[in-house]
Amino acid sequence: GTHELKRAGSRSSFPTKSVLHIVEKFAASDIRKEDAMELYQIAADCLEKKRYKDKMYIESLRDGTFGFHGRPLLWLWRFSSRQKKVEIDNEGNGKGKDAINWQDEFQDTNKPLVVDIGSGMGTCILGLASTSANIHDKLPIEWSQCNYAGVDLNQALVRFGNGIASRWPDARKGRVKFFCCPADDFLSNLKSYHGRSTLIMVNFPSPYRLDASERGNLQLPSAENFMVTSKLFELISVLAANDTNERYFMFQTKCEDVAVYLKNECLSNGMEGITAGYKAVENIDNIYSQKSVPKRVKEWLRIEPLAERAEGNLFWSQPILPLDCLPETEVQCLSENKAVHRCLLKYKNT
């Protein structure tokens, strides 16, 4: 990449988008900052000569803040969105078989654990393990003092996340691990983890089919095979039982009906919502008026015209996590101005 930009990057025949593609693909592989700085400086020079209008983009290349977040993650989203959905069949294929020995996976198993269920490319917890963001007033977690576990059924995505984490030479090493197994199996194993699970996230789960006759995306699971099951909530409740420390649960989805379902399931399983304050969604239809109303929302409201909507103090209109830690799907939604439905909850202290 560096050689190519030195050779041809400043030429008028070398398009601006090619410069952007080179640096974004390198950033999406989480190339080490010290190894990337020469490439980023050359790219910034090229973009300036081409009079690229996004000055903040050029500045991020120059000051080293450009990296494994923001626009580069769109390359990972494109890859992950093409992946075939993995399901657990009747013979148990796709199920985890071995108990997890936590001492083999993390250097210090007394650290609080942050879990991402359905972690995809792993960008969220890879970002959280690396962030220098201040503690969130509504989510008081010291990110640098946590371990991180991603859970997904797609072996290719799990390998990508573990590959990134294995190359880290610094204090992040030994704090991040991705597991290829069903969420229920992982949470059952989590009972033996020495520390506590301080935050469990579900980011953009594959939505269920709206009804049995739906003929749209046949890869979507039926409602009874949706990833977030009543058993999953029961397992999380067991983890939170008799613990005076606060444990948090966060979800986000592009599907309004899924958001309403998850919010109500959380409340009925012993959680209390954390209000979004000035970031709350006051009226979801006003948000849709600034964007396009998703086809699924129209179909859902046709089936259930009096359905509860994803609005009010418990729904967040802005990202909950630090901006350098967003999952690749949230980055894609923000870049295309699509609505995201988010809730942050916690288990009531016992």
Image (spheres, grey):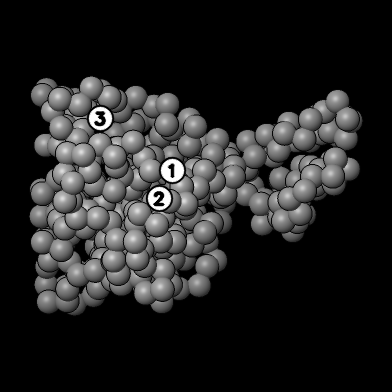
**Residue occupying image coordinates x 45% and y 73%:** 135
In percent of the image, x 43 and y 39: which residue is there?
121
Tell me the quarter of the image containing the C terminus: bottom left
Tell me, yes or no, whether the two marked residues, 1 and 2, touch with CB atoms within 8 Å. yes
Tell me the amino acid under the disc marked 3: Leu
Which amino acid is tagged 1?
Ser
Dot 1 corresponds to which residue? 292
CB atoms of marks 3 and 2 within 8 Å = no
Crowd tier of the residue under label 2, counting other residues whose Cα lies within 10 Å: few below 14, some 14–19, many 20 or above:
few
Residues at marks 3 and 1, CA–CA distance in whole angstroms: 22 Å
Answer whether residue 293 is visible to the viewer in this image. yes
Image point (63%, 36%), residue name: 25
- Quadrant assignment for the N terminus: top right
Nearest the viewer among 79 and 29 is 79
Q: Residue at x 24, y 55 (%)?
A: 309
List x then y, in percent, for residue 196.
Answer: 25, 65
Mark 3 surroundings: few (<14), some (14-19) or many (≥20) residues within 10 A: some
Residue in the foreground of this view, choosing between 91 and 202: 202
Q: Which residue is mark 3?
A: 220
Q: Give the residue number, with chain letter if any, for mark 2.
A: 288
**Callout 3–callout 1 Cβ contact below 8 Å:** no
